[in-house]
Every structure is written in C-alpha cells, then in structure tokens.
Amino acid sequence: MTEAAPRLVARDRPELILGDHGLCPGCGEPVALRILLEVLEELGIVERSIGVVGHGCYGSFVQIMDVEVLQCLHGRAPSCATGIKRVRPAAVVFTMQGDGDMVNEGLQEVLHTAARGENVTCILLNNGVFGDTGGHQTATTVVGQRTKTSLDGRDPETHGYPIPVAELVASLAGVSYVARGAVSTAGGVARTKRMLRSAFEHQLAGDGFGLVEILTMCPTGWFVPAGSGPEYLSGSLEAAYPLGELPLRGQP
Amino acid sequence: MSRGTVSIDVERCKGCDLCVQACPPKVLEMSTEVNGMGYRFPVLHDGCTGCTACQLVCPDYVFQVYRFDAAPGEEDASGTPSATPPGEGRPSATPPGEGRSSGTAPGGRPPGRAPASGG
Amino acid sequence: MRDEVIITGIGGQGIQLMAKTLALAATRGGQHAMLTSDVGGEMRGGPSQASVVVDDEGLRALPILPSTGSVVVMHHKHSAFALGRLVPGGLALVNSSVADPAAIRDAEVIAVPALEIARAANAPNAAGFVMLGAYATLRRIVGVAALGDAMRELVPPYRAQHVAANLRALDAGAGTVLAA
Amino acid sequence: MTTATTRQLLDGCSAITESAIAAGCRFFAGYPISPFTGLLESMSRRLPEAGGHCLNAESEIEAVNMALGAAAAGARAATGSCGQGLALMQEAIAELALNELPLVIFNMARNQQDYFQATRGGGWGDYRTLTLAPKDVPEAVEHTQLLFHLADRYRAPVMLYGDPFIAQTHVSVDVAARDLGPLPAKDWALDGSTGGTGRSRQIWTWAMGKATEPGPGPDGHWRAVAAKFDGIAAMEARSETYRADDAETLVVAFGSAALFVEHVVDELRADGHRVGLFRPVTLWPFPADDLAAATRNARRVLVFELNAGQMLDDVRQFTHDRAAVHFIGGVSIHASGLSFGPLLDVAPIRERILEAAE
C-alpha cells in the first residue's frame, strides 16, 4: 500500500504576516492577529482594508501586518477610524485595541463611535492587564486578579469594578454586531474567527458598528507560566466575561 | 499510520506549551533539547490526525498541518482544506484517538520545511 | 461715501435684525458693509448694540468703532457707550416713544415716535423698522425697497407672518423723514 | 445705486467656512465652545451640501482625532476650537506633526492668551505649528485657503489664530477658490490599496516600517521632521509693516490688535508723531529677520498684545536692540469672559503708546 501525498490543510500563517513578532511565549494576541488577517484574506478585502492600531504590545504588529495601517494615539482608534471611513466609505476600516486602550483611555471614543452607528469594526484584545507596561490593572482586570497596581488582587472596595465594554456597546442603538470570543482553545480560536468574519460581513453590508472582543492570554502580566495561560483565562476573564454573540439591546 | 502530520518550525518556537495542551490525540510533547533561542519545542509522535488544533492555538506560527488523503469514498465530509478543529459544531474529520496506527513522521514530512521532529 | 451708525437698545427690540438688514441691503446694492454686535447674555431686556459701517469703496473699519457719525437710540438704558462715541454734531435718531431726546446734547437730535408710528401703520411690533426706514432714508444709504428685500431674506420662516407689517413699518419710517 | 455684486454679507465663521469649502475641505469635526461655535455651526450646515462631512464630536479630543483619520485617508480636513479646547488637542497636534499629516486647525480664540499655546505647543516632540494670524475677516478668508495649501505642501498641521471679532464680525466678502500652485500627489494617503503587496502603507510616528522593509525609525524620522520645520521656518515667515520706514516708535502687534494699532498710527501720524506698526502675520515662524530689520532704526519698540506678555518673548529675542523693547499690552477680558476687554480700543492704545513714547 502506498502512502498518499500529504495535503496542506492549515498554513502556519497567512502571507499577510510579514515576519516574526516579538511578543512573549504563550501570548494570545498573535493568534488574534492571524485569524484577523485570515478573515480579511478569505473575504477578499485585503486591498481595501485600513487598520487603526492603538498602543499596547499588539502595536508592534504594525510592522508585520501587510495591510494599510494608521498607528494612532492611545484610546483614539475609533475616532480616527470614523474620519477614515467617512472620507473613504468603500474602505473596510477596523481598529485593533487592547483593554487599556479601549476601555481605560478610550472608553468614550468607542461608546460614541458605536452610538453613532459608525460603519467600522472595532477589535478589542482583552487580557485584563496592561501587558506592555509590565502587568498593571486595567478597567477590565477582574475582581481578585493580581496586578502590579493591585498586588493583593483587585478589590472592589479599593479598585472598583471591571467594565464589561461589550455589554455596554450592545446596549446602544447603532450597533450591528457584538461578540466575545477567546483564543485560549482551538475551538475558541475557530469560533472567534467566525465572529470576526461576521463582524466584517456586517460592515460590508453597511449595517453599522461592530465590536469583537477577544479574550487573550497574557501569562507574563498574569504572573503565571506560559502554558497556564488558557487555564488562568478560563478561571478569570472568561468567568467574568461570558463568550458568545451578545444580544443587541439598543435597537431603536 | 497517522492520518495527518505537521511540520514544526522549531526555530520560531518560544516553548509556550499551548500546542501540547491543545492536541486532542496527545501526540505532541515538548523536547528536552532547546532551539537557537533557548526554548524547548514540540516534537510529534505517531497518531497525528491533522486536526489543526496546534496550528490554531500557536502564537508563534510554528505549525503547518497536512492530511494524508483518504482512499476514494473515505474523504471527509467537508472536503475542503479549511481547518476543522475539535470541539466544533461540525463533526471532526478525524476524531481524537482514531488516527491510523502507523507512524507518519518523519516520513510524512512535507518538503521544504524544517524537520517535524519525529517521535 | 462712508456711513457709520451704532444702534443701541435692549434685547427684544430687534436691534440685531435692524443692523443686519441695513448691512445686507448695502451689500446687495454693491456697497461694502461691516457689522459687529455686542449682545448681553439675555434674549430680552439686556443690553443690545450693533455697529454698521457702509462704504462705497473697500472697507477699513474697526470692529469697535472709535467714533461714529450717527447713533440710533432705540432705548436709553445702555446708550452711554454709543452716545459717548458720537462725533460732535453727529446725528442722534431717537425713539422718542421710549427715550428722551432732550437728554442728548452736542448732536443733531431727531426724535421719531416710533411706537406710535408703528401702531398707526398697524405694525405695533415693528418700531425698529420704523427707525431703520427713517435712518436709511435720512442718510441716503439704501432705499426702502432694498431694506424690505433684505429683511424678507433675513426673517426666519417661522416669523414670515411679520414680513408685511415690517414692510409697512419701513415705509412709515421713511415717510416720517420725507414729510419733515 | 451701484451694480450687482457677487459679494455676500457673511460673519467671519461663515466666510471661513466658504473659503475652506472653496479650498476643497470636505471633513470637519468640532465640539461647541464660544466663539468657535459659529464655525462648527456653519460647517455643519454647509459641508454636507458640498459633499463633505461635519461631525459634532463628543470632545475636542475626539474631534481632532476624527480629523486626523480623515487627513490620513487623504481628505482636506480641519478642526478647531478656542484655546481652552485646543489645550485638549495638543497631543493630537503633535501626533499630526510627527505623523506628517496635513490638518488645518482654526483657533477661534477668546483673546490673545493662546500665543504660547500656538507657537510653542503643548504636545510632545520636536514639532512646530505654522500659525497665521489674520487681522480681519477678509484676511482670514485668504489665510484659510493658504493654510490648506501649506498644510498639504508641508504635510503638517497648521493653524489660524482668530478671535471673537474675526469669528463674529459680518463683512461683505467675495469668497472664491484661489490657485496657489501645484502640490505633490498624496501617494502616502491610506486607501487600502497597497494591502498584501508586502509594502502596505503605514502612518506611524515611530516610522518603523515593515519587517520586510524597515523605516527610518524614531531617530531618523524625528530628525527629518525637525529638519522639515527648520525649512518651514526659513521659508514661510510673513510680516507686514505699516508706516514704519521712518518710525522712531515701532509698535508690534498681531491679529485684530494690529488693526486697532494701525488706526492709532494714523491718528498719531496726523499729530506729527513718527509711529509705525510691525505685524507678524505668521506667529510661527516668527518673522525674526523682518523684525530685526524693521527695528534697526527705531528708538523704541512697543509690544501691544492682549495678554500678560507672550509675543514679547519673541520680540525681545529678535529686536535689533532688546533694551528698546517695552510692553504696553496686558490682560483685558470682556465681562462675559468670552472676548476682549476694554483695552482693545483706540483710546487706551493711543494713551499707552504716547505714554511709552515720552
């Protein structure tokens, strides 16, 4: 019996990734980048896509993602995306922001952009921590989570409560799609990729604002071994932020 | 024999271990030696199903996944090269633990890639 | 020819609309105009003042007039600034239904009982246009028809019902001056 | 009377709006604040009619970042506020400069207390903001078109320093598009089309480029940006003198204040005083060489500005004899807080000039 020739079923990365990233072992953000670019490729919209990238570890992706990019100020990506989309309505415009960028510095921007029904897609990479600065508390740090600015764990008495931005966005009129995925398991990666695809399909249909929140591992900022990221994520972020497509409650 | 195989770009690996945990047939294992960056990396044992779970979770784009085409009539339902990970709604073409017995690596290693460190 | 006027009164008297009507009519007629306003915070009752400069040639004027050849006093309450800038012997056109013409010195004072004239013209809310018709006619800046056209352009649609009365008031104001 | 005219009676904000549209501006975003509000209102009325967009943003920060996005996509875009709101925009103005994005910023200032803000800036990095300070509405109309041209030419944020008189005074103006000459194509602007080519466009203050084609990085890029501003400083300084040739007393003033000084100069000349005016038309670049030349024969240089002495720094720096410089301006605010106070008037200016000239 002769062995059949191997048939490629999954490339390591799309050609839109031009080189290596410098992010930590076990980081979830490069996985999110890969599925995002795969979706742009599969939808055939690479040559009209414009990304607006905020500030965090993922900011370095600007150097390796082969789509047009505006690297913008911390928190302001939805506003910049608004300006781009208004003057280039045929372009597919997305943002890539972390939780510090979108929920701390830029909460106002994302909420107002959503409420305007701006026809753009915002992508939140949420790991519940400022990874880039070395593990500090963000607006999405879950109760009990240890960070360098909540050493004994986030305590509502002292640090207040985390903000579920996807639920806030889903409560607004003008929003066409909100979903939350996670890249901590193979199934989660595949489901998250389908969410991204749906969000872009809504933008292509001109339906209005879309948000895909992606829970990503940050073992460095969580102070856990690289391999423990998925387990930590399921016990912390995923417990606080349930996965799936969110019901839209703000329809006029 | 295995129904699938992977190529592993060991020099790009940062040793996070996510693939080992994600592998349904449990055919990946971290090496004892290290790559040029000083990281341990996964090695493949017999029994790969080509399910793509490792490729899906890998943050460092280390894996390419291949399947050995089934004999006529045995082709999987999807018939497409798109990834069909376990745990999905769609039936997996290669349920965990049902890989064919004979080893594929390194003989199944596709050309032009770094060695898929065979078990 | 150059003409300067400061119109002074209180909010609600239509000071700003008078000034803008004059400036627009002059512009439409091919002259150069400048209009500046100083309005108190309140819509009604607070100080309201506007300055209009009209010139046949290109205009060089300051947004706060250092001096003016004429003043229209719709109300005396906030008129000190305008009267203080009136050149000696300048024209003070006074709404004598409200303000006392005798209180003004060193000026060519012309009293116009604008309220009474407006009422007689069946335009009781348009005393300002009586004064504007009188002023523009006295100074020969623009004709009443041009003022009417400008006013019609400036009155917002929800006030269109006042247009006819405003036109009667402009005519009546001009008539007062021509009769004198 | 005279023949028909194409001149319209427009308030300053409406005139600037028409001029901006004639220049091709198609995107504007702002947040209401007096006296800038009039510009936002007229833009929101007129830009959609011209096929553009005007957004009432939820903050000055969002407004300027929206405009930054539109500029990055290649549109002629603008924003504005008064000094209070521009304080919030400083980070983005620096970002625009370091991103080499053209944007026109209208400062409808409440007074002249924003000189430092305009000429020094409050963002980070080695950048400057080319700033034109018109003395009246007709000049603001001209400057608006010039600013869109200069912004594109230098790929930099530029500013118009207005004030309540320029915002609100109605004048008869004729707004027509001016041909200011050719500009380089905006081949850097984002439209998505280079995605997947391996050399997709990138706008980034750090200019790191792509992994496959590295850019100059922050060191090289920021040096180049700084050198560009040196070039602008050498090329774009503008000034005007009025009856200054034989002046013993030269008054330096900008914007509406200069218009008042001009009037006072005429009055004092009529009385036999040898007084003249030097007016920086660009606040940055400050017309240093022009000032040095204009002050060479003056016995005294008087600085009149409606603030505690901001342009004074530049005048001292560049006057031929710095001992001759005296400050005759001051803080003077209207009771409303929203406009000039009583110092901006002919009589007090005349008095201060005469006092200093004795």
Image (cartoon, helix red, strand yellow):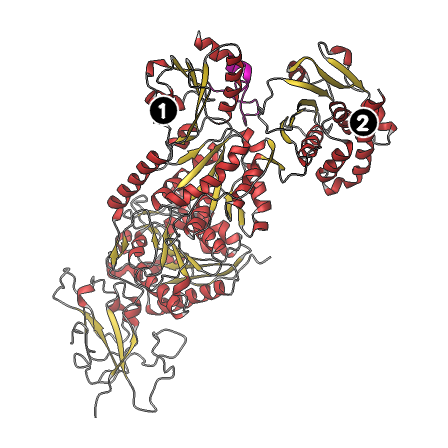
Q: Main secondary structure of the magenta part?
A: loop
x and y percentages locating residue A160 in the rendered image: 41, 44
Please state, as top left, top right, bottom left or bottom right, where the C terminus of chain C lies in the image. top right
Q: Chain of mark 2?
A: C
Residue at 55% from the left image edge and 22% from the top image edge: D334
Label 2–label 1 contact, CB within 8 A = no
The segment highlighted magenta reads: D330-350
Is residue A23 visible in the rendered structure shown here? no
The part of the image, by quadrant, that contains residue A227 is bottom left
Which is more toward the observer, B93 or C51?
A: C51
Looking at the image, residue B35 lies above or below residue D26: below
Disc number lying in front (2 or 1): 2
Give whichever of A78, D107 is nearer the camera: D107
Location of residue D6 by image quarter: top right
Mark 1, secondary structure of its residue: helix
Residue lying at 86% horizontally and 28% vertically, measured from the top left: C119
The crowd level at tag 1 (other Cα within 10 Å; few <14, some 14-19, many 20+) is: some
Query: In this orientation, which residue lies closer to the viewer: D141 or A20?
Result: D141
The number of discs equals 2
Quadrant holding the N terminus of chain C:
top right
> Is residue A199 in view from this perspective?
yes
Q: Amino acid at mark 1?
A: Asp
**Which quadrant of the figure has residue D293?**
top left
Q: Position of residue D43 (x, y in %)?
A: 56, 43
| Above/below status of D268 relative to A196 | above
- Label 2 and label 1: CA atoms lie apart by 55 Å
D292 part of magenta stretch: no
Q: Which mark is residue A94?
A: none
Q: Amino acid at mark 2?
A: Ala
Q: Position of residue D283 (x, y in %)?
A: 41, 30
For disc 2, the marked residue is C174
Left of D212 or right of it: where is A124? right
